[in-house]
Amino acid sequence: MEYKGYKVEEMENKISVEGVKDFNPVHIFECGQCFRWIRQADGTYSGVVKGRALNVCYKDGRLELYNTNLTDFTKIWYDYFDLGKDYSQIKEGIMKDEIMREAVKFGSGIRLLKQDIWETLISFIISANNRIPRIMKTVEAISSMYGNEIEMYGKKYYSFPEAKELSDTTLEKLEVCRGGFRCKYIMRTSQMIEEGIMNLEEVNEMETFRARDYLMQFNGVGPKVADCVLLYSGTKYDVFPTDVWVKRVMEELYFKREASMKEIQDFAADYFGDLAGFAQQYLFYYAREHRIGAK
DNA sequence: TTGCAGGGGTCAA
DNA sequence: TTGACCCCTGCA
């Protein structure tokens, strides 16, 4: 069948999508926006989204999704993989200089996933002063402790728990996930949502600067985490999450000197405009993989 | 082998 | 504006 410009075919527990451009699983799943997609021995990626386990394979314009069906493709995966967006056009818009041409070329198959905002919020609270392998372990531990078990091809996976599950637990139990000092932030954040003090759905209706301030009311959420949550949940794209890697790449390649967070943010807003979030992702991936500015 | 720095930031003083 | 912070890996 034809679905929004793609040729989609449903087979036994599998979907094939023809005509998918600007899609590279390595770039998408390892550019730092998500923590629950694991590369398999055959090069495909497996992960859990909205309580569903999925296996993803891409080759020559054909996207293959295993352990799913047409209904879930139209209801979940089409949006999740941002298939309605023309990334070729976005890339054109941000390749404003030689640096960006390099970065975009390097991460040419990046797409910004539209992830669940609650899961993104907790995941990026965990990311503070942390390393990616341990962030992944902690998110996985929280899922296996509080989420639901799902099976895919004989292997066990776990959904990410709801706020209720985490607000109901004790700090002592939660600390088994090895989140360290971030566990109390996770507890408090879950409670704020569960008690109705905060509502993540409201963020959609806010201007970017308001949404950012709103998210920063959560314990453990500062400007960087707030921007990540907005960008990786597909809520706002005119943010420029500035972590140590982005700061380094901006200082080394653009400023040619040390620069403050504000300088970098202002520059990005002015230079990339509404596409700042996309530019950040190509720059981050480029900087981290090349270890730009690392000692 | 042991010890120590430092990491996708944030909080509190 | 500055140091502490859980935990863990890398490196001397």
Image (cartoon, coloured by chain):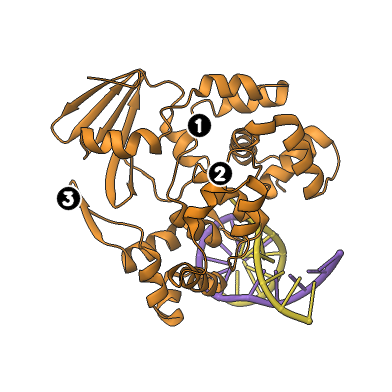
Chain colours: A orange, B yellow, C purple
Tell me residue A104's x, y (percent). 60, 26
Residue at horizontal 73 percent and vertical 43 percent from the top: A248
Residue position marked by numbered label 2 in the rendering: A231
Residue position marked by numbered label 1 in the rendering: A110
Residue position marked by numbered label 3 in the rendering: A154
* Furthest-left residue in this view: A12
Helix, strand or loop at mark 2: helix
What's the residue type where badge 3 is placed? Gly
Tell me residue A195's x, y (percent). 45, 73
**Which chain does tag 2 point to?**
A
Count of labels in the image: 3
What's the residue type where badge 1 is placed? Ile
Left or right: residue A244 versus residue A45 is right
Q: Are marks 2 and 1 on the same chain?
A: yes
Is residue A134 shown to the viewer in this render?
Answer: no
Answer few, some or many: residues within 10 Å of disc 1's Cα (few below 14, many 20 plus, some between 14 and 19).
many
Answer few, some or many: residues within 10 Å of disc 3's Cα (few below 14, many 20 plus, some between 14 and 19).
few
Front residue of this view, candidates A270 and A129 = A270
Tell me residue A85's x, y (percent). 47, 26
Mark 2–mark 1 CB contact (< 8 Å): no
> What's the CA distance linking mark 2 and mark 1?
14 Å
Front residue of this view, candidates A191 and A175 = A191
Quadrant housing residue A24: top left
Front residue of this view, candidates A82 and C10 = A82
**Which chain does tag 3 point to?**
A
> What's the CA distance linking mark 1 and mark 3?
30 Å
